[in-house]
Image (tube, rainbow, N blue to C red):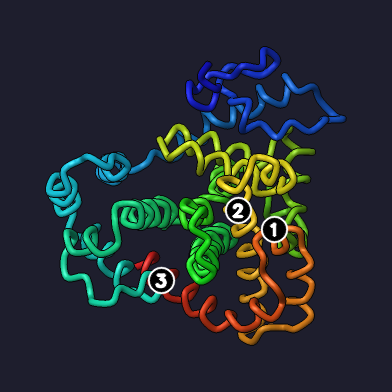
Amino acid sequence: MASSLQTGQPSHRRLAESVVEELWFGDEEPHRTELEASRSLAAALGTATGLKAFPVVLAKAFSLLQKPDESRAKIVALIEQDPALSSRLLRVANSALYAPKRECSSVFDAMTRLGNKNVSDIVAGIAVFGMFSDVKGLGARVRDHSGGVAAIARVLAVEWRHGGADHVFLAGLMHDVGKLLMMQAGTPRYELMEPALLQTPDRVHLVERELTGFDHATLGAHVLLAWQIPSEVAQIVALHHQPGRAFELGEAIGLPVALVRIADRIDIQAGNAAAPDPEFCAALARDESAAYAGFSDVALTAMWPKLLAARADALSTLAR
């Protein structure tokens, strides 16, 4: 039997009809019933998808890039219809984030050297930064944080040859998209929260649940399905504040979640210190995500300059 994630229909009768069970956080809600919370999420999902639609050309290109048998010439022709997209794709493809052995001189060249998966990740990155190019203040910081997390998570995966982390760049890029949408909808009021709370991983989502009955990870995951982003990415996003559940699902979900969570903390720290802090790296190495992915404080310290360089390069190329 197909899962509700595959069919897009929830199997849990208590959930609102547009809420997918596998993406639901599933915790006990002391202040409201599960049905009430899922109905709140369903309403927010309708608002969020109305606020932002995946750009048409980018959506078409992304869809074609997911098909291994699709004509490369057809994909190239579609991307080259948009000169700005082609130019930005090549800037990212030639950046330190991907570091091809020889410079990519065309979209076809980029697809040949990097492969469809990496090019689809870049296209999605360009789309997300373009969709939220108008955000200011806290929203801009969340958008840039997402780009930094994506870059850092990808370097962690590549450097340690974590072949199972196929979706880690895209998941890092999308992990806080629900937060950006909630900010644009005005619920909850993030600007009224303590600044320190917003800089502390694994705390804001608890406040969101208390105020709305769901969190940005759950909303973001459902929006990604509406945008036809691969369901594995939606599940990683849904569970990035629930590592225990993610690890129980195996490496295909657990490893990207672990890498996104490590990158999340590194990106926040990178905004405060250019040099690695031994106490921070030691504490991070003790975290369950670092233990799951096999990172020591020595490894994290040694990789710090490369992680920061990739972060800076990704932000400068995606944002332009």
Q: Left or right: where does residue 24 sit relative to residue 105?
A: right
**Secondary structure at numbered mark 3:** loop
**Secondary structure at numbered mark 2:** helix
Residue at which label 1 appears: 292
Whole-angstrom CA distance, mark 2 to mark 3, is 20 Å
Residue at which label 3 appears: 97
Q: Which mark is residue 178?
A: none
Whole-angstrom CA distance, mark 3 to mark 1, is 24 Å
Is the residue under label 1 in contact with that under label 2 (CB below 8 Å)?
A: yes
Residue 154 screen position, x and y as percent: 49, 64
Residue at point 19% right, 60% down? 107
Q: Mark 3 or 1, which is nearer the eye? A: 1
Q: Earlier along the polypeptide chain: callout 3 or callout 1?
A: 3
Residue at which label 2 appears: 255
Vertical side of 249 occupied by 279: above or below: below
Q: Earlier along the polypeptide chain: callout 2 or callout 3?
A: 3
Q: Which one is nearer the viewer's eye here, 256 or 82?
A: 256
Is the residue under label 1 in contact with that under label 3 (CB below 8 Å)?
A: no
